[in-house]
Image (cartoon, helix red, strand yellow):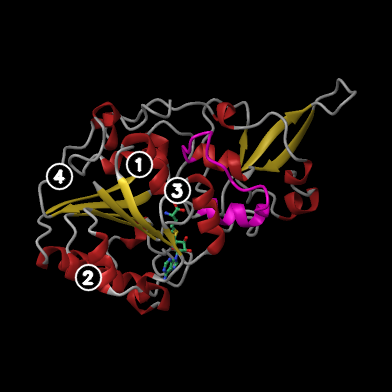
Amino acid sequence: MRVLELYSGIGGLAAALASVAPRATVVAALDINHLARQVYSANFSHPVIGAAVEFIPVERFRAWKADLWWMSPPCQPFTRRGKQRDARDPRAITFLRAIEHLEEVRPTFLALENVPAFRGSDVHRRLLDTLEASGYIHRRECLLCPSTLGLPNRRLRYYLVAGRRPLAPWSASAGDDAPLPRRPLASFIDTTYDGTLVVDPALQERYAGALHIVDAEDPEAETRTFTSAYGRSPVRSGSYLRQGTLPQGTRHQETVIRRFAPHEILRLLGFPETFRLPPSLPRHKAWQLVGNSLSQPAVRAVLQGVPGLCSAQSFTPTTSFL
Ligand SMILES: C[S@@+](CC[C@H](N)C(=O)[O-])C[C@H]1O[C@@H](n2cnc3c(N)ncnc32)[C@H](O)[C@@H]1O
């Protein structure tokens, strides 16, 4: 199966495909952010194109002959913290253009990820109208959160799969009726860490009560959604970690509050341990890119809706993770 990855970022889709659909061919991955493309290319050999989706001529889309288009378009036009300008937001132009391309090219399948507030927006309505008019009569929409799929991390997102042919059934665990058992936070974090991750006490005091802090040893701990603003915006961009530490040469355990390192966030998103962030990538950029990416068990669950894509043993979304 040939897959086109639009708004590919660091390759959240490519990572999920590698685990559940290793025989799929990613014909192209498109993103305007050169650092995102650098991370993508450090991990995958698929062709990566640095161009704005809206400026790619429709003939090029046709020539890729992709069976599935995966899209993770910018979410700022819809986010609750933003102005929610929806179709009037200039950042929605690219996706509106992609919808026009979709109508012209009509790949057999489409899959999409966005923030929950996308559902019910004008752009959402336009997408559904286009799908209806273009023969995508098989559609499935859902909100999935990795906290019900085995990860101690919240990241509620909207997903859509649409097909001009019938979709494959979802696994039971892709629904919200039976949450999968969660691995404890302790198995996702490093016991030693870079001291520069420790939060300045002045900032802790200033935002006392507003920082979401989880305890490294708490088996029930659940981290909040890590956004692209993590490390830049002190609140509502993700969680902080309270962790005991034993400074060298002492026996007295100290407790620190620190930020999660980008690679720890990748683990919480379900990325494989083999996924690499180039050492030259500054940490604040890594936080930004990782905060934009995709939670793996949710994407794997969604991909199951595309018939013939996933290998048989992948039918429990968390199988390759746990
Ligand atoms: C929500 S993020 C998707 C991240 C991706 N799914 C991942 O796993 O990292 C949106 C991405 O769209 C890219 N982007 C924004 N506007 C774009 C445009 N006009 N054309 C192509 N890419 C664009 C951003 O650089 C960002 O990487």
Which quadrant: the C terminus?
A: top left
134 to 275, vertically: above or below? below
Q: Earlier in the sequence, mark 1 or mark 2?
A: 1
Kindly state the secondary structure of the residue where label 3 is placed.
loop
What amino acid type is highlighted by mark number 3?
A: Ser
Q: Earlier in the sequence, mark 3 or mark 4?
A: 3
Residue ID for mark 3: 45
Q: Are marks 1 and 4 in contact (CB under 8 Å)?
A: no
Which sits in the foreground, 198 or 110? Answer: 110
* Numbered range of the magenta stretch: 269-291
What amino acid type is highlighted by mark number 1?
A: Leu
Q: Nearer the viewer, mark 1 or mark 4?
A: 1
Residue ID for mark 1: 17
In space, the residues marked 3 and 2 are separated at their CA atoms by 34 Å
Kindly state the secondary structure of the residue where label 2 is placed.
helix
Spot occupied by residue 123 in the image (x, y as percentages of width and height): 28, 70
313 to 134, vertically: above or below? above
In space, the residues marked 3 and 4 are separated at their CA atoms by 29 Å
115 left or right of 152 in image: left
In space, the residues marked 1 and 2 are separated at their CA atoms by 28 Å
